Amino acid sequence: MSSVVVRRLMATMPNTMSFKQGLSLWCPQSAALNRIPRVSVPSRSFRRSFVAAASFDNENREYVVVGGGNAAGYAARTFVEQGQANGKLCIVTKEPYAPYERPALTKAYLFPLDKKPARLPGFHTCVGAGGERQTPDWYKEQGIEMLYEDPVTGVDIEKQTLTTNSGKLLKYGTLIIATGCTASRFPEKIGGNLPGVHYIRDVADADSLISSLGKAKKLVVVVGGYIGMEVAAAAVAWKLDTTIIFPEEHLLSRLFTPSLAQKYEQLYQDNGVKFVKGAKIKHLESGPDGRVTAVKLEDGSSIETDTVVIGIGAKPAVSPFDMVGLNKTVGGIEVDGQFRTSIPGIFAIGDVAAFPLKIYNRIARVEHVDHARKSAQHCIKSLLTAHTHTYDYLPYFYSRVFEYEGSSRKVWWQFFGDNVGEAVEVGNFDPKVATFWIDSGKLKGVLLESGSPEEFQLLPKLARSQPSIDKAKLQNASSVEEALEIAQAALKTEAAV
């Protein structure tokens, strides 16, 4: 048996060495087991890997990654670091671009031309984490086969083959599913597909929105989460009449406390952005040319507009891999602590993976670039090396807005941990603010706005260690700096015990 076949067989074998509210809404409590039931695959599927080369449309077959987002880019880097990419790795993507740092699409990519917007190849992975910019030429130089604009539409687990939209038949030894998410859309019957209505998941979506922004006068952003806040902030630079509509009582209700949200809302209002809170949309209206003209609310009122951005969430892109094993609670493909699915030799990473969130003992699916990067690296290292420990992810979220030239204030906040328990807020937002979540005397989560690099570096240490902390001391802190000193002292005390 050849060494290549041995590696394939080893890759498919299980390794025997072995938030109450808020962010936890998409991570319900459940048993976070490190292993999930395995599904046996007939051994003849391995023998079929010897079929003649001319039978398949990919040259690199040992490892195939399906998806071209952040997770795919960081997986590619890890394969290269382990010396297992050249002539072995194939990436299949529906996009015409090499993997890129997707968060840029709702941030600097949307800036007007006179505000120095981000453009490819400037934000290919892995620049977001301080790594090399992996342009299309980089993949060629590393011997990685890239199949662009050809999404996978079918999988035959027994034969270990994939079918693409163009009809290509691809062979794999090990399969890594990194398909990410698709944008949740308004139904067509209420105007979800009208001209002037936009969703943002890829470069083509962002380019279409930019084309509209250049001609728009009035913009309505539907949802008060990350996407809504970032798009609205970019719209300020375009000098548009901007309104944010959402059903909750305040911005980013899954994370922000009402007091914290009020501070951000005031910042947006100071920049001319209007809010319609607690509103439900009945339908979108159109004019004689078919283009969107207004947002009709269930209370009978209407908001005139010529451009709408909808950011009501996303759905894990599990098709055509449903049979691999889905988690019906959080959605996505269920994996263990090394991102193995129930099918030997098939892995899932990034937004699409439902994985054991070890620190909080529950199954979670996290839609965030930080998890996409880290899950890819952990999975590939587990696959290729003796690396066997369980993925131990600490939830992390951030946003950066109003960062264009000429902005009166650039905003950057970071959050680590779990927003459970009682919230203690310190600071008045000028120049900074911090919120600490305390549950049963333990510090569970912390958010900091406009912190220094040293202060931001402290946050994950606090959230992971969960030190016992004196709530009264935090409440009496006269500044964010003093509050962080109190938290750091609690951390040192905890470490000394």
Image (cartoon, helix red, strand yellow):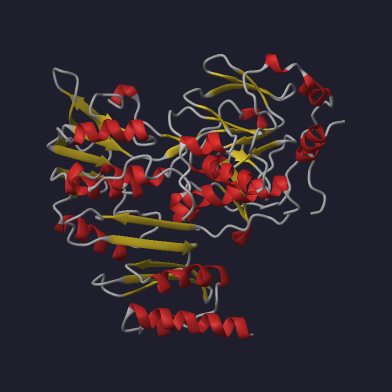
Q: Nearer the viewer, residue 297 or 489?
A: 489
- Asked if residue 294 can be seen in this view, the reply is yes
Please state the horizontal and vertical placement of residue 328, each as a whole percent of the image: 59, 38
Q: Residue at x 30, y 75 (%)?
A: 427
Please state the horizontal and vertical placement of residue 185, each as a whole percent of the image: 37, 31
Q: Residue at x 43, y 28 (%)?
A: 96
- Asked if residue 276 can be seen in this view, the reply is no
Q: Residue furthest right?
A: 1
Q: Residue at x 79, y 29 (%)?
A: 41
Q: Nearer the viewer, residue 340 or 149?
A: 149
Please state the horizontal and vertical placement of residue 248, each as a whole percent of the image: 31, 50
* Residue 428 vertical position relative to residue 279 in the rendered view, above or below: below
**Which quadrant of the figure contains the C terminus?**
bottom right
Left or right: 201 as drawn, with respect to 142:
left
* Residue 103 vertical position relative to residue 160 in the rendered view, above or below: below
Please state the horizontal and vertical placement of residue 217, each as a whole percent of the image: 12, 37
Q: Nearer the viewer, residue 336 or 458?
A: 458
Left or right: 258 as drawn, with respect to 146:
left
* Residue 15 vertical position relative to residue 214 in the rendered view, above or below: below
**How many numbered discs sit on the rendered protein?**
0
**Which quadrant of the figure contains the N terminus?**
top right
Residue 410: quarter of image: bottom left
Q: Residue furthest front?
A: 141
Residue 142: quarter of image: top right
Left or right: 243 as drawn, with respect to 25:
left
* Residue 281 vertical position relative to residue 251 in the rendered view, above or below: above
Left or right: 264 as drawn, with respect to 70:
left
